[in-house]
Amino acid sequence: MHYTAVATTLLVALFAQGSIAQDPAMATSTLTTVCQQAAKIPVCDLYSTSCKANSTAAACNPVSLALSACADPVAATNSACTMFKSMCTGACANQGAVKDLLPARNASQQVFSICTEMPTMTDCQGDARCPAPDATGVSDCKSWTVYSALCREMPDMTQCASWKSFCSSNGQVAPFCGGAAPTTNSSTGGHNHGTSGNTQGTTTGAKSSATTVLTGAVGMAASGLLAMMLML
């Protein structure tokens, strides 16, 4: 029993420090769950529009995307983020969030500022526009998509400094920094407001998948480590 407890403790520590960084399955599961429940955050715009079509893009490391999602105050308390942050430490956490990607509140504020100054811009009107931020400071829209579209149209606006930094840091990722949107089978593109329905079953499946990955990896490693320790 003593060796089993020691082996389990060591394996959990080792898995938390390195395995997630090497195998992004849990990060992807976390990101999927968060984006079903909080689709308005910028990292979900990036994930659904660019990364599903081009997973090798500079900004599309699954661990960095998940870290960005869980750092956004809108999603920080999501149960999937709570689990992910408890496991993604050490080498995993050191990968860092997507560089210079704004959280939802900041992106919403930039869009609101631009559209207050220049309400006739295309993306400040009609179905493409973002409503004013709510009491939490977040607009109920895909604020990063709208913000990027506004800045592509008028890149020298003072509000676009953060957009320029993001594009410079992430290889001018399309379509947010220019170019056509990548072809993707996702149904979440565009400036649609809100999230799709029936997320409860999908969320449960995502959590189950993440748990399976975690349990399987720890279990396989445990067998080998425990056997070695019992030989001592």
Image: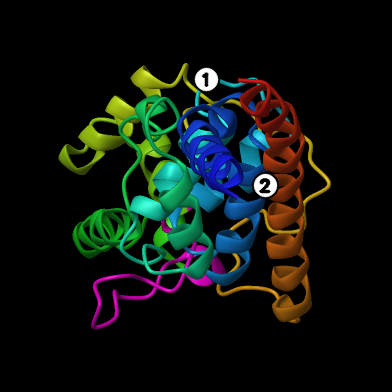
Q: Which residue is mark 1?
A: 58
Residue 160, image quadrant: top left
Judged from this view, the residue extending furthest toward the right is 185
Q: Which span is picked out in magenta?
A: 126-145
- Main SS category, magenta section: loop
Q: CA distance from mark 1 to mark 2?
A: 26 Å
**Which residue: 23% across, 30% down?**
156
Image-based side of 172 in relation to 115, left or right: right
Judged from this view, the residue extending furthest toward the left is 158
Residue 115, label in figure: none
Q: Residues within 10 Å of mark 1 (few under 14, many from 20)?
A: some
Q: Position of residue 113 (x, y in %)?
A: 20, 59
**Which residue: 51% across, 27% down?**
18
Mark 1 / mark 2, whichever is N-terminal: 1
The verdict on residue 131 being magenta is yes
In the image, what residue type sits under mark 1?
Ala
Q: Position of residue 227 (x, y in %)?
A: 72, 28
In the image, what residue type sits under mark 2?
Leu
